[in-house]
Image: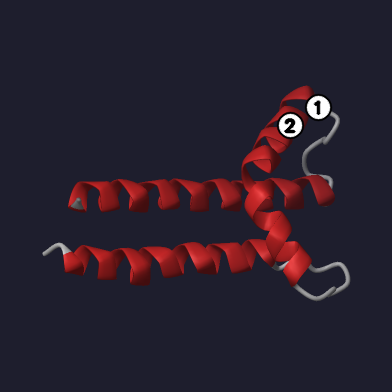
Amino acid sequence: MIELLGFISYLIDLYVYIVLASVILSWLMAFGVVNPYNRFVSSLAQALAAVTEPLLRPIRNALPDLGGIDISPLVLLLGCFFIQQVVLTNIAKLFL
């Protein structure tokens, strides 16, 4: 069971990196550093959005409107870190 919890923790780490990559790519596209009309960039952005949007959309709907600031990735990352540090470690303590 401990190995399964370690694997889940690894998957959460991987998802955190994907969310960070999505945020950084959106910033680069917004500030004109990369061309959003490039095929590779647009397909990468679309792939990252397909992976992150199912969890970001409910968070965006629950948060109040803050104008042009989107803090939903921050809330998602905090949730991922909470699951890793609190939930998974307490479940692991049950099996030790």
Q: Position of residue 92 (x, y in %)?
A: 22, 63
- The amino acid beneath tag 2 is Val
Q: Which mark is residue 41?
A: 2
Tell me the kind of residue under disc 1: Asn
**In which quadrant of the rendered view does residue 47 lie?**
top right
Residue 50 at x, y percent in the picture: 68, 38
Q: Quadrant of residue 45?
A: top right
Q: Residue at x 53, y 69 (%)?
A: 78
Compared with residue 93, is residue 12 higher up or lower down, i.e. above or below? above
User: In the visual, does 29 lie left or right of 2?
Assistant: right
Q: Are marks 2 and 1 in contact (CB under 8 Å)?
A: yes
Residue 53 % position (x, y)? 69, 48
Which residue sits at x=43%, y=52%? 12
User: Which residue does the image show at 82% across and 35% down from the upper left?
Assistant: 35
Position of 65 with respect to 89 (left or right) is right
* 86 lies above or below 26: below
Which residue carries the number 1 mark? 38
The residue closer to the viewer here, 74 or 27, is 74
Circle 1 residues within 10 Å: few <14, some 14–19, many ≥20 = few
